[in-house]
Amino acid sequence: MIKYETIKTFNDLEMLVYNYVMKNKQTVIYMTVRELADAVHVSASTVIRFCKKAGFEGFSEFKVCFRMYLKKEETQKTEEDLQELQDYFQKAETESFQNNLNEIAAVVKSAKRVIFIGLGTSGILGKYGARCFSNEGKYSQYIEDPFLPISEEMGESVVIALSVSGETEQIIQMVNRFRQNNCRIISITNRNSTTLAKMSDYNLSYYVMEHDKGNHINTTTQIPVLYLIEAIGRRL
């Protein structure tokens, strides 16, 4: 909304206003000039000057245009999200993708036992996957404890490892222990170039925009993962 060339002309006080507006988008549109000035600890005239430099007659016009900008931005974001999922499902309809699903489903169907692993959101989906497969007649379980000892009794299992990044240390360590007990590994990751994908016998990657916020918080869409779990489940 505000061009880079304009931002460069802001003085220190005007830049304070700009930074506050960008960090508090949904709040600013309901504030008065005085409320915004008090929040930023500048004068009302500084706020007005900021608005005029940005190309508006005053704060009222700025708020109207800013509200329209936010609405348009939200609409574009939703359209982008939908386009991303549409692109994914178009890829999922291809013959090679469906053949890959059929092959993996056959491996799962012939396994003595099926074990899901994952942490955080992937862990929640692991629980869902175990229930989904069990509903289809293939009893499956989810292991929540990443430090659970892997015994020989778990040998020859099929392990389905879920991880957006494919680099979660605890999951990689678990997969390594399962491999030592002759388990086959199926991983579902966002990319096939990850450590987990390379360690697996089979990998399903969905390639969507990743949203990693740090501190183990990842808000990447998991709709493709749900589809993959259910698609395999239906084939059982």
Image (cartoon, grey):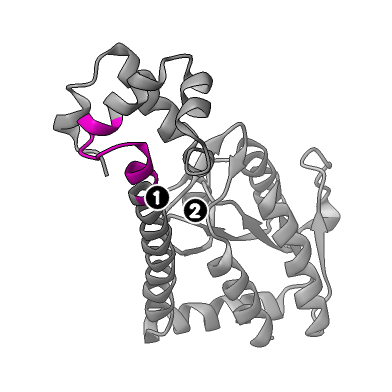
How far apart are the alpha carbons under marks 1 and 2?
6 Å
For residue 193, the mark is: 1
Secondary structure at numbered mark 2: helix
Q: Which residues are magenta?
A: 51-64
Return the residue at label 2.
197
Q: Is residue 119 visible?
A: no
Query: Is residue 127 toward the left or the right of residue 166 in the image?
Result: right
Residue 20, quarter of picture:
top left
Q: Is residue 55 magenta?
A: yes
Label 1 sits on a secondary structure element that is loop
In this rendering, position of residue 119 left or right of residue 36: right
Residue 138 on image: x %, y %: 79, 79
Residue drawn at x 34%, y 14% as measured from the top left: 13
The answer, for residue 54, to whether it is visible in the render is: yes
Name the quadrant containing residue 74.
bottom left
The amino acid type found where label 1 is placed reads Ser
Please give the name of the residue rendered at 72% of the width and 60% of the height, measured from the top-left corner.
126
Q: Is residue 211 above or below residue 84?
A: above
The residue located at (48%, 38%) in the rendering is: 28
Residue that appears at 66% across and 86% down: 234
Q: Quadrant of the C terminus?
A: bottom right
User: What percent of the width, then of the height, locates residue 149?
Assistant: 83, 41
x%, y% of residue 54?
23, 35
- Locate the N terminus and report the quarter of the image it occupies: top left
Dot 1 surroundings within 10 Å: few (below 14), some, or many (20 or more)? few
